[in-house]
Image (cartoon, helix red, strand yellow):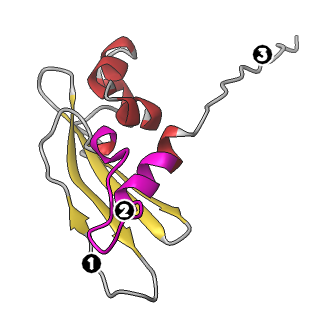
Amino acid sequence: MLRAMADGGFQKFVTISGGADGFFFNGPKETKQINAHLKFGRNEYRFALQATVVGEMAINDEGTYYDGPQWPTSWHKWGSGKKESDLPSWKDQKSNRGNWPSVEAHVYDAVSSWVFIMSMTLAAQHR
């Protein structure tokens, strides 16, 4: 899911995975929202997901944070109610404090570099 967000294909991922309802424990009537807060060294990324009535997911409260000694900072909020994450637009973003990668660029690099390996375990039935 995170990789799809970084690649700009979040809604496609949700659709081919059977729609938003399947991501929520007992469906969206029971679980209203999925919250994520990820830390990569001093950089942080958060977002919340909510199912829509048309089976998609809305990305809410997307934000980044830098927890470093150089500058006091607060969460950079990137909006709510979006169909796609802002992650792809952060790929080469420069810091507003100099000519080096921004917090958002570091977050993008971390998330986009992840490779997920799925494995299936078959359980033998004992009779």
In-image side of 54 versus 33 (left or right)? left
Residue 39 is marked as: none
Contact? badges 2 and 3 (CB < 8 Å): no
> How many angstroms separate mark 2 from mark 3 (CA)?
44 Å
Residue 102 is marked as: 2
In-image side of 77 versus 7 (left or right)? left
> Does label 2 or label 1 sit earlier along the sequence?
1
The amino acid on which the numbered mark 1 sits, given as a three-letter code, is Ser
Residue 14 % position (x, y) = 33, 22
Nearest to viewer (mark 2 / mark 3): 2
Nearest to viewer (mark 2 / mark 1): 2
**Image quarter of residue 72:** bottom left
Residue receiving disc 3:
122
Contact? badges 2 and 1 (CB < 8 Å): no
> Does label 2 or label 3 sit earlier along the sequence?
2
Residue receiving disc 1:
74
Question: Circle 2: is it few (<14), some (14-19), or many (20+) Cα within 10 Å?
Answer: many
The amino acid on which the numbered mark 2 sits, given as a three-letter code, is Ser
Q: Is residue 112 above or below residue 19?
A: below
Q: Residue at x 30, y 52 (%)?
A: 47
Q: Is residue 7 above or below residue 48?
A: above
Q: Is residue 91 magenta?
A: yes
Q: Is residue 97 above or below residue 51?
A: below
